């Protein structure tokens, strides 16, 4: 687990009446105060999480698209952008 995740876990594990500030936790874990606050409040995500959430297709759907492209290529039918877009829309919904 990354330091920022450890800092968030420690911040969330505090007793309700005994809250330390974001600044104190950031200093304890050597992380940015702003990043700690944003991640803990949910307004900022890690790059990996953000990338996964912004994908138009799931990994399984991407695999199906690649198989379709390979089949077209084997038949010597080069896939156009329009063909790929249409098939991607079909498998996405």
Image: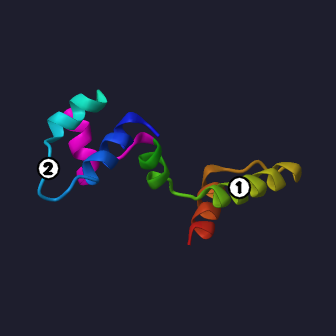
Q: Horizontal and vertical percent for residue 47?
A: 42, 40
Can see residue 86?
yes
Dot 2: element: loop
Residue 29 point in image, percent of width and height: 30, 31
Residue on which disc 2 sits: 19
Determine the image quadrant of residue 36: top left
Q: Which residue is mark 1?
A: 63
Does residue 45 appear to the left or right of 88 in the view shown?
left
Up/down of 1 relative to 13, above or below: above
Q: Quadrant of the C terminus?
A: bottom right
Q: Nearer the viewer, mark 2 or mark 1?
A: 2
| Point 25% across, 31% down: residue | 28
Residue at point 83% right, 55% down? Answer: 71
Magenta stretch in the rendered image: 33-47
Question: Does the stretch in magenta take in 5?
Answer: no
Residue at screen point 44% across, 52% down: 54
Q: Is residue 21 left or right of residue 92?
A: left
Label 1: element kind: helix
The answer to whether residue 82 is left or right of residue 67 is left
Q: Name the residue nearer the viewer: 44 or 13.
A: 13
- Magenta span: helix, strand or loop, mainly? helix
Near mark 2 (Cα within 10 A), the count class, few <14, some 14-19 or many ≥20, is: few
What separation in Å lies between label 2 and label 1 (alpha carbons)? 47 Å
Residue 44 seen anywhere in this rendered image of the structure: no
For image coordinates 29% across by 27% down, the residue present is 30
Indicate the quadrant where residue 27 lies: top left
Earlier-in-chain disc, 2 versus 1: 2
């Amino acid at each position: 687990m990354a330091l920022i995740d450890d800092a968030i876990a420690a911040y969330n594990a505090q007793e309700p009446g005994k809250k330390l500030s974001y600044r104190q936790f950031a200093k304890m874990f050597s992380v940015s105060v702003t990043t700690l606050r944003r991640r803990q409040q949910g307004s900022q995500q890690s790059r990996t999480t953000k990338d996964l959430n912004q994908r138009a297709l799931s990994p399984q759907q991407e695999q199906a698209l690649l198989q379709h492209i390979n089949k077209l290529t084997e038949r010597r039918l080069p896939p156009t952008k329009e063909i790929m877009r249409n098939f991607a829309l079909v498998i996405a919904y």
